[in-house]
Image (cartoon, rainbow, N blue to C red):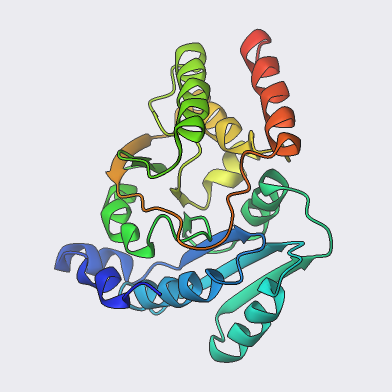
Amino acid sequence: MIDNFVYLMKSLTTKDKEYFKGKTIMIAMPTYNEEKNIGIVVRDAFNVLKKITPNHGVLVFNDGSTDSTGKVLENLKKKYSKLKVIHIPKNKGVGNANNVIYKSVKGDILFWNASDNQIHMDEIFTMLPHIKDNDIVVGNRVHRADNWLRRLMSGCFSLALRIRFGLPVKDIDSVKIFRIDVFKKIKPESKTAFIETEILIRAKKKGLRIIEVPIKHYPRLSGKAQGVRLRIIIPQLKQMFKAIFTRW
């Protein structure tokens, strides 16, 4: 377990605290077979939120986990009254999970993160101040702690989409902070991992304000990465090529 004191060293300025204390801020994440990580990330999510505003909550989408992730989450609900969990019986992939999250989340501001603990919850303090003047804040994993194949695939994917659509973002599939009303303006439809790209493309076309800021990325300490499975990558690539070679 990573020492929680590392997470809580960051904070907001007094001016930022005044701005955000009246906002309802949510942290949401999809999860699949993260029994060793989910307790840590939920705990840290509530720890950082309590430092920002009393109006907060955490939403976890359990994407058909086959380990004890679901049981861990149900136990966590007994401890955290502001934890909401959506369970589905069969894994449908991160795109479907995010589609449900973006349609379900309520409040003013959403910090979307993964549940693998590779981006610590205290990065909300790095990213959150920028949402005051923007609609979407993307966290750029400057020194990404993944294997070379994952970094190469992500880099090529992002480069192609930046060139085609002029997106002002290098790390498209990274964590994000949204003004929640963004989802009413652009209404994302994708149920594949392409949903993150779809949101940025539609946001740019709507003239919404997008900014990218550098964040830290840590090695995975437990569990297994799921993002490179063919049944996730192939539908995402199909939608990417459709977007590139047709008019959106």
Q: Residue at x 66, y 11 (%)?
A: 247
Q: Residue at x 47, y 74 (%)?
A: 40
**Residue 186, how many percent across, how many down?**
60, 37
Give left or right: position of 107 versus 209: right
Q: Quadrant of residue 69?
A: bottom right
Q: Nearer the viewer, residue 148 or 120?
A: 148
Residue occupying image coordinates x 49% and y 20%: 156
- Give the image location of residue 110, x and y in percent: 48, 57
Q: Quadrant of the N terminus?
A: bottom left
Seen from this angle, which residue lies furthest left? 14
User: Residue 197 versus residue 204: which sits nearer the camera?
Assistant: 197
Residue furthest out toward the right: 89
Question: Would residue 38 appear left or right of 190 to someone viewing this image?
Answer: left
| Residue at 62% across, 13% down | 244
Q: Is residue 46 left or right of residue 100?
A: left
User: Residue farthest to the top?
Assistant: 245
Residue 53 in view (yes/no)? no
Residue 231 in percent (x, y) is at 76, 37
Can you see residue 182? yes
Looking at the image, residue 34 sits to the left or right of residue 164; the answer is: right
Residue 73 in picture, x, y percent from top left? 64, 78
Q: Is residue 210 above or below residue 29?
A: above
